[in-house]
Image (tube, rainbow, N blue to C red):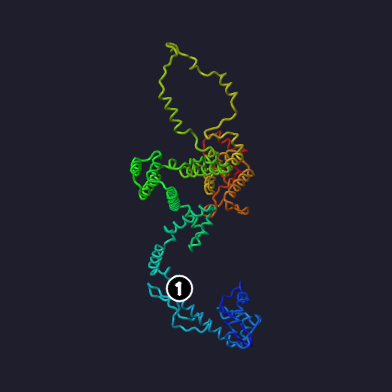
Amino acid sequence: MVVVADGKVLILDVQVTSDSHVTSLGSKFMDKVAYYDQPDLKEKVLAFVNDKIFQAVPLTGSSNVTVAGVIWSWRGAFSKDTHKILSVLGIKKCHIRLLTALLMELNCEILRKNCGRVPGASVTGAANLNSVETGFSCPTCSRSFPSRIGLSAHRRQSLLCKAAFHAETAVCANSRTRARWTDEEVNVLARIEMSLNQHGVKLTNARVLAEYAKMNANRSLDSIKGMRRSERYQERLSALIMENNSNEQQQEQDSELAQNDTTVAEWAEIQLTIPDLPTNLIELLRALQSCDTRKAMELVDKVMILWSKQLPANEVGEKSKVPPQPLSNRRRKVLERRQQYRRMQLMYKRSRTLAANQCLSGEWREGASGFPTEALKAYWCANFDAPVKGDERPAQIGRTNISLVEPFTADEVKRILADSTPTAPGLDGVKLADLRRVAEKLDEMLSNLKTAPLKPQQRLYILRHHLIPKLLHQLVLSPQTSGRLKIIDCKIRGAVRGWLTLPRDTPIGFFYASYQDGGLSISCLRNLIPCLQVSRFEKLKDVNEPDIQAVLNHTHMRSFICKAR
């Protein structure tokens, strides 16, 4: 808009914008002035005004042209600079209020249409916007609601309308389709990658996305990455590369034929020098030696291309198989770790007990033990198939070696007892040395469990059901003090805190609380071991043996039981 007043020209641009705490109306006004404040634009406007109005005495100089803007929000608020411009133009405050009211009425009309308001309702301002009647009714029970949210809540909760609402939701969910890749899109993406390869550009998903976005294709980086990994895309890309190579070969052959004016007979003679040609192709080439048509040569070229595609890869080209590059130490360790993880997870699914025993003992590092099946088969087949050799030693008949059945003497027994250790394990296999090194055994098993390729939940399961029960028998039989049991509990809590990445201020009750109470349900050895010792001695009271009762009534044993309680 161009306004001429008092010999000056004013360029105005009206804009309705949203007001927020980020961008004010004053900044919008300055942006508008900076956009139109250009010397070329001012000269054009000045020439237009001189041509239409000031023909007798034309205006000169860009200082007579001023740029301004009329900026107001959707609620009818004007910027301070706009008030000054309007007052200079002679617009009074009452007229500005009238413009504000008209804008509010227009906004209310737009909201009524977008939000489903009744068309016949009259709105004169923002205060009457909430008093407009609405028509949201339930299609099942015909009940009306003031808002769409209320109608949706009624249809989800009402017993009468719930079934119909869920049925409509299921139909809408089944009718949705994902933005799948069409064959044309896959073809375009493959051609883009092939062209980038031909130009020697480094292939990255971001570069492919940038080239693909030039065609106004709405695809994300993750979508491009997933499609390039799919088998469908790889097959299409290989087909396009093969087709492009065949076209290039055809063009090269056509150019050679065009440059070298060779006859069909000479060309067929050259083709017959290729080794291992099929019989039908040899007959065709020999028949073409007496023919001199370009069409026949093209047919033979097509047959040659089809025949070369059917051959294995090592018979067509001159490229030999490239030996694989040696793996780095880091890559080798990563592959070994993945194999160990796969093997351990499979074992955990089949037998948790076997997996727990291998993890606690550290045998999972050794991998699959034993010899290969082929080696064992070759060894035993050679042994069983060998001819049998007879025993050539002379047999003693009628005489028996009595020394083999003579009884042990007392001196032999004394000599054997002197060489033996003073202790021997019982049926449980626990020795006296094992009772003294419970803490060392616990550290070893926790270290093996930490380095095992397991998930945190699996480590926690093995700790509760295998590691702690393995220590209970030794801890009950050994004279463990409360201080040692506290140290063992502290080590177990530290290992669990590291597996689950728990903060250091995690309460101790969280470790020992049961599942129903929201805890990890780990046994507290400081409280469990004394209880098991007391229950073990309580059962001995029912044994009717005077020696056992004498041991239980001893002062040391009584003090031990009282201390455990």
Residue 166's quadrant in the figure?
bottom left
- The residue lying at 49 percent from left, 17 percent from top is 404
Residue 346 x %, y %: 47, 44
Crowding at mark 1 (Cα within 10 Å: few <14, some 14-19, many 20+): some
The residue tagged 1 is: 148
Closest to the observer: 51 or 420?
Answer: 51
Closest to the observer: 301 or 421?
Answer: 301
Instruction: Looking at this view, name the residue that lies furthest to the top.
Output: 398
**The N terminus, quarter of image:** bottom right
Closest to the observer: 510 or 144?
Answer: 144
Judge from the rendering whether residue 81 lies leftward or rightward of residue 370; answer left or right: right
Residue 235 x %, y %: 43, 51
Residue 414 x %, y %: 58, 21
Q: How many marks?
A: 1
- Position of residue 336 relative to residue 152, above or below, is above
Residue 97's quadrant in the figure?
bottom right
Q: Is residue 532 visible?
A: no
Q: Is residue 45 visible?
A: yes
Q: Secondary structure at mark 1?
A: helix
Residue 200 x %, y %: 53, 52
**The C terminus, quarter of image:** top right
- Position of residue 503 relative to residue 538, above or below, is below
Closest to the observer: 334 or 66?
Answer: 66
| Amino acid type assigned to the residue bearing label 1 in the image | Arg
Judge from the rendering whether residue 349 lies leftward or rightward of residue 63; answer left or right: left
- Position of residue 169 relative to residue 481, above or below, is below
